[in-house]
Image (spheres, helix red, strand yellow):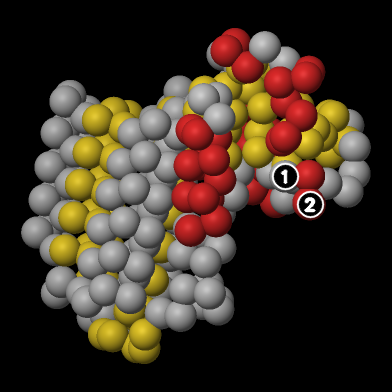
C-alpha cells in the first residue's frame, strides 16, 4: 500500500521509521500545506505541497497518515484530518503487526496503533487517535476522537476517554473512570476519580491542577 505522511517534523520521522519496518506499506512522500512548505525533501524522500497532490498521484490509490501530534489539544490534527476527508482522500488506519487487538474491537479511521499496544475485547477507539507503544487498554473502554495516549499507559475496564485528550507516559486509570474532554493527564498520574472538562490533572492520586488553555497549553 502506498502512503503519504502528512507532516515533516519529529512525529513524521517516527512514522517513517515505523512504516519502513513494515512490509505492508511503501512511503512515497511527505506532504505539508503550501504555507509551511520549505524543503523539497525530508530524510531523502520528496515533500509535496498538499494542494498539489492530485497533480502527482492518483489519490484513489494512495493513503495519507497524519503525523501531527497533540499541539493545541490535538485540534491541529483534527483540522487536517477533516480537510483530508473533505478532499475525498484516503486516510490510513495504522495498526502495528505487534499490537494485540481483542475480539469486537472497533478502531476509527486514521488512527495510529503503535508497537506492543494491547486493546482488550469490545473496546472502541475513535477516529484520528494516536496510541503509542506498550499501552494496555482494558475491556469495554471507549477512547473518543482525536486523543493522544503516550507510551506505557494502563487503562482498567470500562474507562471512557472523551475527545481531544492527552495522556502522558505511565498514566494509570482505574476501572469505570470518565476522563472528560480536553483533559491533560500528566506523566505517571494515577486517576482514581472521574475528571472535569478542560482540565489538567497531575499526581498520585491525581488532582486537578488548573484549567486547559487550548491555544497555549504546554505539554
In x, y percent, where is residue 56?
78, 18
Residue at figure coordinates x 64%, y 48% from the top left = 11
Question: Mark 1 = which residue?
Answer: 33
> The N terminus lies in which quarter of the figure?
top right
Above-or-below relation of 136 to 75: above
Residue 85: image tag? none
Asked whether 113 or 79 is in front, the reply is 79
Determine whether, in the image, residue 89 is placed left or right of residue 159.
Answer: right
Q: Determine the secondary structure under disc 2.
A: helix
Q: Could you tell me which residue is drawn at 90 percent across and 37 percent down?
A: 40
Residue 79 at what x, y percent from top left? 51, 50
Left or right of 95? Residue 23 is right
Task: Using the rendered image of the protein, determine whether residue 116 is visible from the camera's viewpoint.
Answer: no
Picture residue at 59% right of the left edge, 11% below the top? 61
Distance of label 2 from label 1 (alpha carbons):
6 Å
Residue 163 vertical placement versus 62 (above, below):
below
Query: With respect to residue 210, does 38 lie above or below?
Result: above
Pinpoint residue 110: horizontal percent, then vertical percent.
45, 34
Say if mark 2 contacts mark 1, CB within 8 Å.
yes
Looking at the image, residue 47 lies above or below residue 176: above
Residue identifier under label 2: 36
Whether residue 127 can be seen here: yes
- Quarter where residue 25 is shown: top right
Amino acid at each position: 500500500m502506498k502512503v503519504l505522511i502528512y507532516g515533516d517534523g519529529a512525529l513524521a520521522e517516527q512514522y517513517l521509521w515505523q512504516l519502513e519496518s513494515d512490509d505492508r506499506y511503501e512511503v512515497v512522500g511527505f506532504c505539508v500545506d503550501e504555507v509551511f512548505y520549505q524543503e523539497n525533501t525530508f530524510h531523502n524522500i520528496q515533500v509535496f505541497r498538499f494542494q498539489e497532490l492530485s497533480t502527482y498521484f492518483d489519490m484513489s490509490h494512495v493513503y495519507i497518515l497524519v503525523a501531527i501530534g497533540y499541539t493545541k489539544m490535538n485540534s491541529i490534527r483534527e483540522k487536517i484530518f477533516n480537510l483530508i476527508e473533505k478532499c475525498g482522500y484516503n486516510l490510513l488506519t495504522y495498526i502495528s503487526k505487534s499490537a494485540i487487538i481483542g475480539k469486537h474491537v472497533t478502531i476509527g479511521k486514521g488512527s495510529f496503533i503503535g508497537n506492543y499496544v494491547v486493546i482488550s475485547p469490545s473496546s472502541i477507539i475513535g477516529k484520528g487517535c494516536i496510541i503509542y507503544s506498550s499501552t494496555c487498554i482494558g475491556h469495554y473502554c471507549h477512547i473518543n476522537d482525536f486523543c493522544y495516549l503516550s507510551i506505557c499507559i494502563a487503562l482498567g475496564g470500562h474507562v471512557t476517554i472523551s475527545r481531544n485528550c492527552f495522556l502522558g507516559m505511565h498514566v494509570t486509570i482505574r476501572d469505570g473512570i470518565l476522563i472528560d474532554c480536553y483533559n491533560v493527564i500528566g506523566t505517571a498520574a494515577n486517576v482514581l476519580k472521574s475528571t472535569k472538562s478542560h482540565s489538567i490533572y497531575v499526581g498520585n492520586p491525581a488532582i486537578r491542577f488548573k484549567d486547559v488553555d487550548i491555544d497555549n497549553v504546554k505539554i
